[in-house]
Amino acid sequence: MKDIILQISLRSIRIHFLRSVLAALGIVIGVVAISSMGMMGANMTLSVTEELSKMANIVVITAASGSGGGPGGGPGGFGGASDKKISEEEFRDIQKIAEKYGLVYVVYRESDTIKVGDVKGRSTIYGLDEDVMRQIFTLSDGVFPKSTSSVLVGPTLAERYDLKIGSRIKIGDEDEGITNTVKVVGILEERGMSNDINSDMAIIGSEKLFTGIYGNEGEYDQVNLILNDINDSQKARADILDKMNRKETTVNVQDSSRMLESITSSLGTMTTFVMAIAGISLLVAATSIFNVMMMSVTERVREIGIMRSIGAQKSEIRRMFLYESIVLGVVGATIGAVLALAIGWVVVLAMVGSTDYFFLPESLWYIPFAMLVGIAVCVLSGVYPAWRAAGLDPVEALRAE
Amino acid sequence: MPGDSIIELCEVTKVYPLPAGNVIALDRVSMTISDGEFVAIMGPSGSGKTTLLNQLGCLDRPTSGDLFISDRNTREMNDRELTSLRLNTIGYIFQRFNLLPLLSAYENVEFPYLMKHRRPDSSGRVGDLLAQVGIDRAMATHKPPELSGGQQQRVAIARALVNDPQILLCDEPTGNLDSVTGQQIMEMLTELNRKGRTIIIVTHDPGVARYAQRIIKVRDGRVT
Ligand SMILES: Nc1ncnc2c1ncn2[C@@H]1O[C@H](COP(=O)(O)OP(=O)(O)OP(=O)(O)O)[C@@H](O)[C@H]1O
Ligand SMILES: [Mg+2]
């Protein structure tokens, strides 16, 4: 049916086209800003989540530094160094408990000075069982080490020191006189951030090579458990903690689900914050809509007086102005939504570096969300002007020029 | 022909408070208009004729005094009820046409019809009324600013009649019309009056006033 009130609103928008466009522009910008910020956050979260879930199957066990170890060393950081080591005996116990969940292996770790040619630097040196190496690493070049003087190097380290197969690295400080020269036999594929072994910047050798340099045989820096089923992570953690720490706290256990949770939640907070800032643009839009609506009311006082005096109810007048702001809101929000697809894509590409997740509902959801917010802002900005218009006295309004 | 009272004013006073002092536009006006009467209101410019008509048309509330429409005290009616009285019972032809600028002539006449019936006119009533006041189909598509003063007034008359009001209030309806059209309009009003409508017309023109059964004279806000 023909709604004459809506007709009047549409015509009023049309004759004040430029003004209406400018008012709607604020909403367009607001919707674009909110949705692209939201999508950026969502895409970031999705990409970090996927990155992290690659290592969701890893449980890291370190010695609890607080127990009987005396002073020195805070609680073992995330895969970080701790003075306390895990003894061979404790490892056996852990193995007994955790074997059923997956592969349990020990890690020797030390940070040391290295020298390649004339270039000095520092690197982490890992000592690992040869079989374990084969299971957890893939090589981009070369072979796994077969002797106690051959090592694998991470891709970042290789690039920094220009290491090739056959390159030699001096481990240890020359000033202290003890150096060991090792030969690169393999280069690892990039593995990214991980909480078990950060291999990209590391030198990896056999256990023998490691203990040959640093001693401390049977005193491990870390025990890793690679789960067969990632859903076991909480259970395995509880199990190990329960049995190992029965008498006193001997080990810390870190599973990645907690880290994932905390990162996701801080990304969520950041997204909300950025969106709130983008929301300020809607506040600006609200003032401009409000302004335009007030102008529209002032210009049409006489028209309102005529309508009221020939029998239009206050509600019809309110409706007329609310329609006007709703139309501005819907048009602005729709244009904003279309632009948000394009601009959001660019923002996500620039900030997250990948648009793999762009079309997922978790990401696209921000567009209708921002549209709704934009339309709501418009309607709210139109409420007072509409109410003012409806409240005008018919006779007074009729006398207006 | 006149029957029971349809409009009754008791000591109706209208005061406009202005910075320069109060303007008493209507001063304790009391009068009765019977159902089906044809009344002319005459008086000099600024005497309060429009103010009086606005009271009769329930556009405005009295500062003091009571106004009864069909024996209902308008003081006891809320804005909604007064508005629907204006929509259904009263037709108002303004001194200044007062057409809605965004609507075509046809839509202007249709507007009160839509407000009342909530559906478009399918009976052809809008078109018939426009034809009766001499606005043809082509002209009916024009917006008010594209029409002459006389044409606008005729559209305004058709609009006032569209909901078939019991009371028709006219503020100088022929002031902008040539004498031939003016006469046609007056004959239309007379015909409506014959069909039982109450007609109250403000005019300066004694020739127009002759159509009325009774003349009310207003001077300085008082009915004499
Ligand atoms: N809204 C208002 N505010 C202040 N004064 C008003 C208002 N409306 C009318 N008046 C005053 O009330 C008096 C009566 O005005 P009104 O319009 O009723 O005169 P009128 O008889 O219709 O005159 P005209 O023949 O020129 O149309 C005038 O003095 C006018 O200035
Ligand atoms: Mg007047």
Image (cartoon, coloured by chain):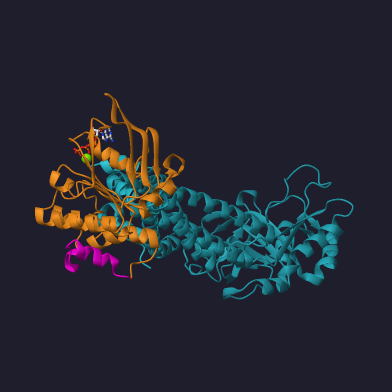
Task: Give above or below for B93 relative to A341.
Answer: above
Q: In which quadrant of the rendered view does residue A55 lie?
A: bottom right
Residue B132 among magenta residues:
yes
Task: Tell me: A365 left or right of A85.
Answer: left
Closer to the camera in the image, B65 or A305: B65
- Taking the image as drawn, is residue B134 in sight? yes
Provide residue A255's location: percent of width, then percent of height. 71, 60
- Taking the image as drawn, is residue A218 in sight? no
Closer to the camera in the image, A293 or A227: A293
Task: Tell me: B197 left or right of A185.
Answer: left
Q: Which residues are magenta?
A: B123-140
Residue shown at the point (28%, 55%) measured from the top left: B160
Q: In which quadrant of the rendered view does residue A9 lie?
A: bottom left
Provide residue A190's location: percent of width, then percent of height. 56, 68
Closer to the camera in the image, A373 or B60: B60
Chain A tint in image: cyan
Residue A38 among magenta residues:
no
Residue shown at the point (63%, 66%) measured from the top left: A53
Chain B tint in image: orange
Provide residue A194's location: percent of width, then percent of height. 63, 62
